[in-house]
Amino acid sequence: MTRPLDHITVVSLEHAIAAPFCTRQLADLGARVIKVERPGGGDFARDYDTRAQGMASHFVWVNRSKESLTLDLKQPEALAVLWELLASADVLVQNLAPGAAARMGLSWEALQVQNPRLVVCDISGYGSDGPYRDKKAYDLLIQSEAGYLSVTGTPEEPCKSGNSIADIAAGMYAYTSVLAALMQREKTGQGSRIDVSMLESLAEWMGFPLYYAYGGATPPPRNAASHATIYPYGPFVAGDGGTVMLGLQNEREWKLFCEHVMLQPGLADDPRFDSNARRNEHRAELKALILAVFGTLTAAQVIGRLEDAHIANARMNTMAEVWAHPQLQARGRVQQVDTPEGPLDALLPPGAHSSFAYRMDPIPAVGEHTEAILRALGRNDEQVAALRASKAI
């Protein structure tokens, strides 16, 4: 069974999350991804922690199905190897510091001369120009600059996302932009340059609060896990300590909630709560009533009532419960990939395709494929040994 990108070779000068997440998704679709790493330690994300069977949690998530090539790009011999790879590659993805690739001679203009069909995707915090071009950009800082922190958290304190949302957004837009550029190349025969910034990616995801506060209007308040304008909508604690998420979208559901969940049908017509605007205005009073009922029930009993009333609901799962989620298990979404430390569970990418299976190959050790790649480029034993002796690889 063929995959959509089986014929595509990607070279990536990547570290951390944004670029590796982009290229892992290209690998999922069959692309050959050659990950260029520093000799010795490799991608610094390998050292973030040791939570995944002795390996870093971030790294194992975004680096399966890749080949690891170690090159010290400060050495001319190593840079020459990279140029050879790029001469026939389809895509270059890089998220080095702003201007670092150009200082090595890897500008879009120079690359286009050597390989006019090459697609070059540059990922950075703020983009390749503008007053913030050289500003350091980490995920939390971009969450702040993009306004995410201003609408996330409690009224007393902003909270960051529990995952690397700015990196993920940039990686997703880089991934889809590369796919678009490859489709465009089929029409024109020419490669192109893509300039993806973390700020612009996360700002796009902020569309609702941006327009909600358009023209100087009051922005959505920080309401922890509750909805800013709809109530009841969010987390409620049951008597056994479990947290149940629920959401009411309209007045029909509100009446069902009062009758079948609260067992208080008359509450539906209480003038404090007979519209969403009034429920939102009196949310503290309504919350106290809901918690008084939920406090006599277990989380499972609350969910049972919500299900019977056809009210949207969910459990607040732990990470262990997500790995064991019955829906993911029933759909076969948890599989295994090999790693240097043995097999590891991995989630299949979203979207089940009838025409192909996602590639789920091993996570590479640092430099695992260096010699094989060099020999495929024509280097003999003596030349490989010389590169290793000089620490170019």
Image (cartoon, rainbow, N blue to C red):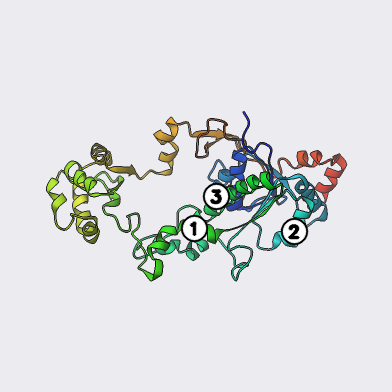
Residue furthest right in the image: 382
Residue 227 seen in this snapshot: yes
Q: Residue at x 34, y 43 (%)?
A: 315
Using residue 382 as the reference point, say whether residue 162 is left or right of it: left
Mark 1 closeness class: few <14, some 14–19, many ≥20 residues within 10 Å: few
- Mark 2 vs 1: CB contact within 8 A: no
Q: In front here: 293 or 84? A: 84
> Counting residues from the N terminus, which is met first, the one under dot 2 or under dot 3?
2
Q: CA distance from mark 2 to mark 1?
A: 29 Å
- Position of 260 relative to 77 (above/below): above
The type of residue carrying mark 1 is Glu
User: Dot 2 corresponds to which residue?
Assistant: 109
| Disc 1, SS | helix
The residue under the point 69% across, 63% down is: 99
Frontmost of labels 2 and 3 is 2
Considering the numbered disc 2 on the image, is that residue within a helix, a strand or a loop?
helix
Q: Residues within 10 Å of mark 2 (few under 14, many from 20)?
A: few
Q: CA distance from mark 2 to mark 3?
A: 25 Å
Residue at the top extreme?
1
Q: Residue 391 in the image: x percent, y percent?
A: 79, 51
The amino acid at mark 2 is Glu
Residue 172's mark?
Answer: 3
Kindly indicate the quadrant of the structure image that contains residue 89.
top right
Position of residue 221 measured from the top left corner of the image (x, y, whole percent)? 34, 63
Against 111, residue 370 (above or below) is: above
Q: Position of residue 273 (x, y in %)?
A: 18, 55
Q: Which residue is mark 1?
A: 204
Identified at 72% across, 57% down, the residue is: 108
Mark 3 nearby-residue class (10 Å; few <14, some 14–19, many ≥20):
many
Q: Quadrant of the N terminus?
A: top right
Amino acid marked by disc 3: Met
Q: Mark 3: which secondary structure?
A: helix
